[in-house]
Amino acid sequence: MTSVPSGIAVETEAPAAYLERYGLMLLIRLFETEMQRLFLKGEVHGTTHLCAGQEAVPVGVCSALEPGDYLAGTYRGHGHALAKGTSPDALLAEMLGRATGVCAGRAGSMNVIDVEHGLVGCFGIVGGSIAAATGAALAAKRQERVAVAMFGDGATNQGYFHECLNFAKVFSLPAVFVCENNFYGEFTPMRAVTAGQDIAARAGAFGIPSAVVDGNDVWAVREAAVEAVQRARSGSGPTLLECQTYRHHGHSKADPARYRPPEEVERWLARDPLTTARVRLVELGVAEAEIDAVEEATRARMDRAVEAALAAPYPDPQAEHATEFAP
Amino acid sequence: MSALVEFRDAIRDAIIEEMERDESVVFFGEDVAAEQGGVFAVTPGIQDRFGSERMFDTPISELALSGAAFGAAVAGLRPIIEIMFGDFMGLAMDSLVNQSAKYWYLSNEQRSVPLVVRSAVGGGGRFGAIHSQTHATWFQGIAGLKIAFPSSPAEAYGLLKGAIRDDNPVIFLEHKRLYSVKGPAPTADQEVLPLGRARIARPGHDVTIVSAGKGVADALEAAEQLSGDGVQAEVVDLRTLRPLDLDTVLESVARTNRVLAVEEGPATGGWGSGLLGRVAEHGLHDLDDAWLLATDELPIPYSPTLEDAFIPGAAAIAASVRERAGIMLH
């Protein structure tokens, strides 16, 4: 494995910036909690894939990006969208199939697109985000922007992964490939279906620098992301970050995740990215009261989003003026 | 105006002029920038003109190629890509079907995906079953995609310019048996052809022959043969298979009352059967006869004798019309 070369300056930041990131992680957690509740009430339709437990990855990665940079996410993408700047109101309304959704109810949980905030899209086909970000990086090169692909461990066995890493390196594209390795591709353990069992090492074959990152530590994710984004923006090409994390829920709403050993689940729950971030904030001298205030404000924010989404109308099929083609 | 233009040169001219006109147009594919300009020598010299940032060779990597085109289009470029043989489109399908085609609608029209995917298609070149297919019908049922299939050098020039300027994803088919065909230079009204409009390639009043791509050239040749038998065939060049210009076909059928669709591909699931269904649905009162000349439900064979018999050419079209009309050969 090629590791990320040290020596690239990573800014040291005041704890206040991390308090804000903690608030964003909490927003994602609360969003997923609401998704589960609303799904059981029949307000969320079809299926949905929750990212609770993985919040530190998108928050850490997006903290290293400029607003104009691109992000392509996955069908487990609520955290990707919120971290990139999609409003919780618009995202929740989309989940509920309401007219006020970010895609006016046309997309749903697996296919969210928010161009205004640089969210190229969330992609329902495993590995699709890798291709989307690679293409965005082709345009980003001209625009002095960076494009990030989020994808799971399962996607690293797709052709998209291998073809696009090769393509991005050959053309030295400003891309960052972020693997959220949660150790399960749907119901199947990553190690059972991944030759070599080492995702970061795969980058070495392409001459792409890579790093294994503690994906439950928002500090560690940000540090790795800052280096990778700097490398991309300076014209030095792509990076692969393997962020190791864990989903608290099953693959989708149909999956109780009984295939995971209880002790494994317990071990990861003990390393909940929110709990550990909170402890760290206190250690860094952030007052409990300050953290409480952020938590309270975030809960209120989420409550408002839920209230607004539930009150919003469904799209009216009679009033839809969908066109097959752009004029 | 009087000079003849070769099909491949018309394609190249259209690409060069659009790249000159619009900085956001980029072009990449396998071997396209190499000196020869691709396996069919369509695009030589373009990289010299525009540099390797805007025109470049890619790895043999159709997933990455098509995915990159999608992502680049969403992020502000207007990519033209070449998927060398249409048969390779199976590999590129996810980006085109699941990403590019649906983006405009799913995003609630936040952004469209302006890209063009050029490929060489069609049989007759002895390339065998997996380098001879016409992939248009694989994409026929995908909302949000346009499919263009030019029939002559002038049409290729205008349709490609129209495709590059179109804000939607366009599958662009180039019949490999047309590349060396020379034809009249584009007229003023063929400069930029908006997609979705068919044309009457030859007027007639006895039967309408509808086709696209090389099928139009074959139909025109068949129509000449038939005029010797006293049959005046009208030839409709669809130009685009999606969207389908049904109105032009219906207007023609209203004049001729007979329609033949000529398709280089199996009848099942093809555009021809779809078209005849639509004509029956909307123009039954005008119809005395409607039929389809397609290929057998088999892969395209290699051996020249088998391949020539497999593809419906001009002689087969003329024979089919004579048979249907009950005309005996002199």
Image (cartoon, coloured by chain):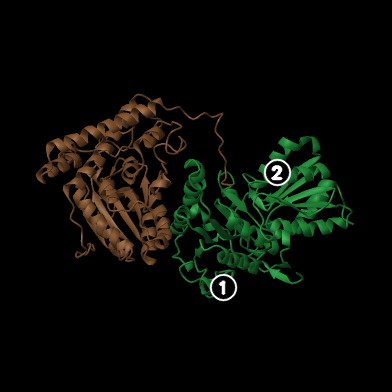
Determine which residue is flagged by label 2.
Answer: B246
Asked whether residue B83 is in view, the answer is yes
Residue sitting at 17 percent across and 50 percent down? Answer: A14
Marks 1 and 2, how far apart at CA: 37 Å
Q: Residues within 10 Å of mark 2 (few under 14, many from 20)?
A: some
Which residue in the protein does label 1 denote?
Answer: B44
How many callouts does the rendering have? 2
Colour given to chain B in the rendered image:
green
Q: Percent from the top left, x then y, of residue A248?
A: 24, 37
Instruction: Answer above or below: position of A125 versus A208.
Output: above
Of residues A51 and A203, the one nearer the viewer is: A51
Label 2 sits on what residue type? Answer: Leu
Residue B122 pos. (x, y %): 63, 59
Residue at mark 1: chain: B
Counting from the top left corner in percent of width and height, residue B88 is at: 52, 58
Q: Is residue B265 visible?
A: no
Same chain for the residues under marks 1 and 2 in the image:
yes
Q: Tell me which chain the residue with mark 2 is part of.
A: B
Q: Which chain is brown?
A: A
Horizontally, residue A176 falls left or right of residue B264, namely left
